[in-house]
Image: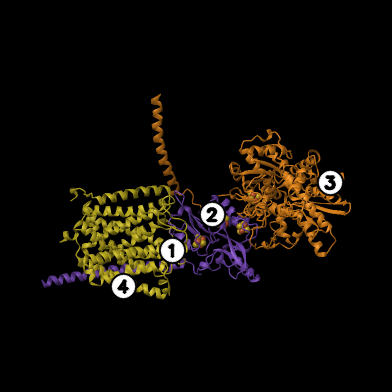
Amino acid sequence: MAAQGWSFRMTPIRKLLILLATICVGVCIFRLATGLGLVTNLNDEWPWGLWIGFDVLTGVALAGGGYFTAIVVHVLHRHQYHIIARSAMLTSLLGYLLVMAGLFLDIGQWFNFWRPFVSWGHTSVLFEVFWCVSCYTTVQVLEFGEIFTERVGKKWHTIFKNAMPVLMIVGIIFPTLHQSSLGGLYLIAVDKLYPLWWSTLIPYFFLISSFFVGPAMICVESTLAGNAYKHKVPVEVLRGLAKIGGWFMVLYLALKLFDLSNRNVWDLVFAGNLESTMFLIELLFGVIIPILIVFSGMSKSRSGLFIYGLLVSGGVILNRMNVVFTGMSGKTGGSYFPSIWEWSVSIGLVAIGVLVYCFVVENFRILEHEEHHA
Amino acid sequence: MAKGVLVDLTKCIGCGSCTVACKLWNDKKFSVEEPTVGPAAIAKLTANNWTVVQHNEIKKDNETVWRFAKKQCLHCQDPACASACFAKALQKTKEGPVIYYPHLCVGCRYCMIACPFNVPKYEWDKAFPLVSKCQMCSTKVDKGEAPACVSVCPAGVFQFGEREKLLQEAKSIIAKDINYVKDIYGEQQAGGTSWLYISDVPFEQLGFRTDLGTVPLSTYSHNFLKYTPVVAVSWGIILTGLYHYTKRRNTISEENKNVKL
Amino acid sequence: MENRSAKPQSVSRRGFLKMLGGAGLAGVAANITGCSTDQAGGKGWMPQQYQVASSWPVQVRGRVPIDPTNPSITRDDKKCILCGQCIEACEKVQTVMGYYELPIKDDITCVNCGQCTLWCPTAAITEVDHTEKVFKALENKDLHVVVQTAPATRVALGEEFGLPAGSVVEGKQVAALKKLGFAGVFDTNFTADLTIMEEGSELVARVTGDLKKPLPQFTSCSPGWVKFCEYYYPDLLEHMSSAKSPQQMMGAVVKSYYAKQKGIDPQKIYSVSIMPCTAKKYECQRPEMNSAGEKIGKPDMMDVDAVLTTRELARMIKKKGIDFTQLADEKYDSMLGEGTGAAVIFGTTGGVMEAAVRSAYFLITKQNPPDALLTLTPVRGLTGVKEAALEIPGVGPVRVAVCSGLSNARKILDEVREDLKAGNPLRYHFIEFMSCPGGCIGGGGQPRTSLPPSDAVRQARLDSLYTMDAKMYKKRLSHENQEVLDIYKNFFEHPMSHLAEELLHTEYTDRGKQLTAKKKA
Ligand code: SF4
Ligand code: SF4
Ligand code: SF4
Ligand code: SF4
């Protein structure tokens, strides 16, 4: 297979993506050389903006499909879902690499990124996030080694294959910890984050939502990839996954309702201000409607599942954005809207992700994995 | 013993000596675009302004009065910023000051999110930007000197000394003089701060946040983080258990299938 | 040749790129290796008096507060070294700062005298600069720009051009102003004489009982002093002469009498004054200083549009490259240009008193004063408080006091207050107050001297004014000023006429509510 050489098809869309990616790389270099003031609209009132909000917080959540599948397929051994395992894990790996890129761009002393490895600020939630994300990304790279060595450096393949169970389990512990601690970052913003989002339970909300966004992303991704690569994952497989997600959404919803009552903030939910509106949109379209879809006949169709996936992913994105922006705006004052350069980097990073995904899928056994086993 | 500063806002005349002292001592840039004295809307803490004196016009007994409020880092007893720093670039010293080590800073700005008083600022215009905030002149404090801003005030606004004593002093001042509001800002806020304020007008009218709790903010993170090791270990055990259990179950059902066949 | 020049070029280009890369890498490396592991801050300096353990008292500490909207003075923080000299000036010389209780009320107490601008060693405190504003007005073809010069600038401006202190540069100053493009150059001496007519008449009226206002009468020509009285002695404002200062009289006259005589729309007149004083910048924008406008229903039109200090005028002359010392003397423009020796000594402490006495004598006796009254030695000189008693036929002994520098004013005012409270017999009939030590010759807008503002320089300026009075001016009595006599004939009719009250007199504001004055210790 190695002899076949590498292939990468060129299409107009891909050309556009390459253009976006190139712009992004240019802006990144400029940013690293000149600091944050020229490129971003960040300011003292808004120290965290699009890059942290979208590229990092949302990116990590959306890449949650990896550990979701790992649990379902490799720990619970639901082999009917094996068919999506590799692509889900690839997406997850790419997601994390992009998150790392986003983080690297966002930190002011980028050449000092390694400092927390030696100077331990262990009282910080960010410390946990940092370690877990770093370790998990490493683990994922190793996991991908199994696929990679199928084609390159074959002699290592068995080592990787044997190491897989351990990697898998470690690779679940880490995301469990950091998905929740990403929410935990905001625990300390108790006097800043709007009470509709701030809660001592926010780590668990982040954790559960990162878990159920996994199947949703798989639905979206496999529909898109399926169209592009004529690789259709059976509807039943997707529906099964979505249902697992559905149960977690029910759990999430119940916890939310409990939390709102427990903290006595129902009046804020219907206050009619910006915060309450955004909160309701997030909950209605991101959680309640998808639950209805997945447990009804609508989820029997591919398009139903696709819509489900979109709604849930959108809901999680909105949730993260609400935490970073809507929820913080009341107490911070000042104003922030991402600059065109911030957008171009965020969009460009996604473009890079898509391009690499396409390249890997076309050159490694990702989608046709099951057929080879058969 | 931890040092502190008691700020009697009723005495401030808005001369701005303190802000100049801070810039002289800490070698900070003067800039017309970033005034250090004026209404809160224009006199803001920035990377260059570690302290500002904010001018407030306040209704008091049917009269408008001018009150100045000197702002800088409050040097929390249990600082949120330091607890949030994942590289230990911000540290609380036992003498009181919360200080910043640039060489440890990664530039994540989580301290800015964490600080309930919005004190840490960022050098947005620098190529390799750092966080920037009042150090309580800790090198001076170490030598037994008062912070620069404190030492230059011509109006007797400040007292420098041990926080505990200053707290007693503040209590006796507000108990004796009916003009003061019966509250010491910094005694309790977010777990208490090294800088304490007394005033004759309500603190919220001077731009102080009065909606803060009395619990140090790091408590919230701590209550979450303390479970990390337990969760990691037990989750690992559960996962391993499940892995073997389901694998075995599958094998058994396979075998059963095979037997039937 | 070509080869040789081509070679270094290519080398240098590579070198340049190398250097760029090197610099970038070096910067990063310096940061990475963290050359310094120090905490932030503490890398600057502090004046020595602040580098002491604990917080013991120190002799000088901090600086004066200055409101950002102060019309007279401003400070560049960049230049302030916290030396505390401004506090010495404000608190010790002028007794303004530190004489009110804390908390403050709704004002940053400042009498705008500008003494701090003379004391500040780095010139961090300066006048609010209006030179640009005046240059703009001069360039505006629609405006008729006129200027007046105070008595004291003519003995100080020369210092800015290397002349010895006290050099008389009256004619050169006029010449320079004409070169700068002013359409009319007038002498504040003219309105100083006018002030004497009004203020002298008022004094006579108080003495004779025609005016139901108390004695002693206070002079009112020093705006810093006026504001000081409004702040700290509002209960004594009744004693303040209602006559405006010469600057404001000139302003009102220019936009009424002069405009009428010349047939110019007063709204097209831009009136500038050259003053030794920063408080004049404040005075000209006091809301009531719009009498000429008020009269024609345009209350927005101020009588004086811009005030420049002696220092600012020097800067303008220098900026235009005018070789001041080489200028040939020129004369003030007529109609508002004549002044007497009595007027020119307005610029020094005791001068207003002496001028007033000369004309009061005349107003009461209808005769000119004897020679002894033309050199009233007891009120001359830099001493802070001076007293004199003179015999005026028909009135008896008139007792006067003169003080300059507000710490001296305080002493006399406290006496007056106590006398009133205790019902003591009248100690003085007339008191001259000047805000700055030595009077206008030591004004806050005058050229800076070696520090602290030196008495030698003040004395030289003062001597010159008396020399001008005695030797250079043809007339020494205000009531002999021909142009003053003309303005009464053509316009005001007589001192304290209805029109004169409208244009030449004013009212004062009780500022006692803006601070809590400290009780006398
Ligand atoms: S005020 Fe803010 S920056 Fe200062 S010690 Fe407290 S948390 Fe840290
Ligand atoms: S304590 Fe020191 S660093 Fe902090 S505001 Fe005062 S002078 Fe500046
Ligand atoms: S030095 Fe003192 S009086 Fe002056 S602004 Fe600062 S705190 Fe207020
Ligand atoms: S005299 Fe000048 S330099 Fe000295 S403290 Fe005052 S303003 Fe600052």
Which element is circle 4 on?
helix
* Residue type, numbered disc 2: Asn
Q: Nearer the viewer, residue C440 or A247?
A: C440
Chain C colour in the picture: orange
Which element is circle 1 on?
helix
Q: Does residue C325 sit above or below A352 in this rendering?
A: above
Q: Are marks 3 and 1 on the same chain?
A: no
* Residue type, numbered disc 3: Thr
Left or right: where does residue C500 sit relative to residue A123? right
Crowd band around label 2 with a 10 angstrom C-alpha radius: few (<14), some (14–19), many (20+): many
Q: Position of residue C472 (x, y in %)?
A: 78, 38
Of the numbered discs in the image, which one, if any, rests on residue C377?
3
Which element is circle 2 on?
loop
Q: Nearer the viewer, residue C411 or A54?
A: C411
Of the numbered discs in the image, which one, if any, rests on residue A365?
none
Left or right: where does residue B104 sit relative to residue C488? left
Q: Does residue C2 sit above or below C184 in this rendering?
A: above
**Chain letter for the part of the structure drawn in yellow:** A
Q: Which residue is mark 2?
A: B49
CA separation in Å, label 2 and label 1: 24 Å
Q: Which residue is mark 4?
A: A250
CA separation in Å, label 3 and label 1: 76 Å
Image quarter where the C terminus of chain C lies is bottom right
